[in-house]
Amino acid sequence: MTSLTPETTQRPEVAAGTDFAIELRKINKRFGPVHANKDIDLEVKRGTVHGIVGENGAGKSTLMSILYGFYHADSGEIVVGGQPVIINNSSDALHLGIGMVHQHFMLVDNFTVIENVILGAEDSALLRPSVDKARRELTRLAEEYGLNVPPDALVEDLSVGQQQRVEILKALYRGADILILDEPTGVLTPAEADHLFKVLETLRNEGKTIILITHKLREIMAITDRVSVMRQGEMVKTLETSETSPEQLAELMVGRRVLLRVHKEPANPGDVKLEVKDLVVADDQGTERVKGVSFTVRAGEILGIAGVAGNGQSELLETIAGMRPANGGTITLNGEEVTAADEDYAAFLRRKGLAHVPEDRLRMGLVTNFYEWENAILGYHDEPRYGSGLMLEIKAAKAEAKRHIEKFDIRPANTDLKTANFSGGNQQKIVLAREMERDPDVLIVGQPTRGVDIGAIEFIHNQIIKMRDAGKAIVLVSVELDEIRSLSDRIVVLFDGQIVGEADPETADEGELGLLMAGVNNKKAAVQ
């Protein structure tokens, strides 16, 4: 068995006759009582794109973290190119030609692209030769794989899609022949995701091996050659992609039949619950991001707001929710103008019947170091049922949290667990349960299923539809066009901070919405 040490850093020869870039045999990994990987067997053919799918908590990322050296398996064997190896850390993995692009990028924001690429891979203490070499290599990689990124740009000035390209460039610069991508499109726009797929096809055609971890079945069907399904820490099945279907994969992932489309009755709109008129909002740098936006939302309907990320959606939601002051225009809730900029504005709106599921659950929706029960009442902890004055009625708060856990199937069912220890999908359910269970008149939801597995997506969509059918007015922002089209009763499209069109979700296709998202329209819409 090959164990890489400072004295043995040469990449092992590929064994003659092997078809597999990676073989994992009987891999086991425990975290305390949690058996994250149970006797996992996996074979990944060379020069293919191999998908790994499963619900949040199925063990996908743990398995790949073992392959990349972040974790050590409790037992089992790793075989690379037909040779058994021991991978003690990520340096060992890189020496073996294994690179990994993580869901949350590992870049230094105030470094340039070149500085990030060479970081940890410098040829000597003198940086100039390394920078010159990296510049030449980045030019070659950009031409060969379509990974165009300005080499001297600061990472913090790049779009999310460009930052991801930097991560891929880092791995290729270090000589990766096997590339692991963990939920690579979770933060990308549809256009950026399409570009990524073209890059992956080019890499595969050049003989690279790609392992793609995702919960998006459309992506699996579009780009992979083979797909492995994991459920509850076990490998359920590996299939040729051409011989399976999204419905079969969904059933293997969840262990039951899953509806991939939202079924809902036609909307029955009532009175106007939310009116936004001529709203103007600036970002933290003073740049106008929302430019005179107007719309209304009625009881019993879902208004979907589509658009490429960065066109004012975030600032719009934050202002309606009371997190950001308006620079102009008005917001009317239940017939009462509520536009304000006081410190207690968000709490005031909650009392007036507005609930908010933020786009970024980790930055704005949760305190991950708090227990689950604390997050279950966050923002509502001053309600009389949880005590008065300085004393919090913990028993009542935990009872509410347990009710949320049961109704929203939050796993694990432990109110005393730190929220950081829940999967992304279950963290999202904690936020959704907290906001939805307040019986609001208006619900504002940003990216409701970002980073959420297919079983939880189905559940979340059904909960949103139930709220609509109960007469609630819902504003939905999502970069997932399928989600916007299937949930919304009306769709408006934001481009450069303005509404450029309205579309009927029953008839609008991706081409029509895509043109609007690019700012192409025949006439400016007046949305009422």
Image (cartoon, grey):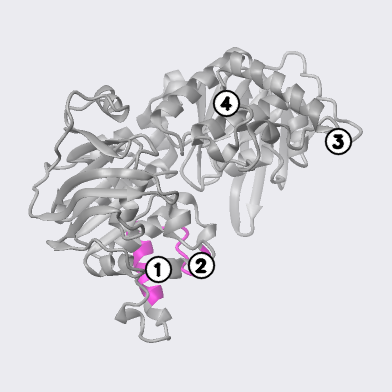
Query: Label 3: few (<14), some or many (≥20) within 10 Å?
Result: few
In the rendering, which numbered label is found on residue 378?
1
Q: Where does the image place residue 57, in percent across and percent down from the top left?
A: 51, 48
Q: In the figure, residue 18 lies in which quadrant?
A: top right
Q: Earlier in the sequence, mark 3 or mark 1?
A: 3
**Label 4: which residue?**
149
Say which residue appears at 15% left-offset and 48% top-offset. 296
Q: Is mark 4 in CB contact (under 8 Å) with mark 3?
A: no
Looking at the picture, which amino acid does disc 3 mark?
A: Ala
Per the model, the C-alpha gap separating discs 1 and 4 is 41 Å
Q: Where does the image place residue 411, in percent across and percent down from the top left?
A: 45, 57
Say which residue appears at 41% left-offset and 31% top-offset. 217
Q: Residue 409, can we see it?
A: no
Position above or below: 242 against 103: above
Per the model, the C-alpha gap separating discs 4 and 3 is 26 Å
Of 345 and 89, nearer the camera is 345
| Magenta span contains residue 440 | no
Q: Where does the image place residue 262, in percent across and percent down from the top left?
A: 24, 39
| Magenta span contains residue 413 | yes
Looking at the picture, which amino acid does disc 2 mark?
A: Phe
Magenta extent: 397-418
Say which residue appears at 26% left-offset and 38% top-offset. 498
Q: Earlier in the sequence, mark 4 or mark 3?
A: 3
Q: Is mark 1 in CB contact (under 8 Å) with mark 2?
A: yes
Per the model, the C-alpha gap separating discs 3 and 1 is 50 Å
Q: Residue furthest right?
A: 7
In the rendering, which numbered label is found on residue 370?
2
Classify mark 4: helix, strand or loop: loop
In the rendering, which numbered label is found on residue 398?
none
Per the model, the C-alpha gap separating discs 2 and 3 is 43 Å
**Label 3: which residue?**
125
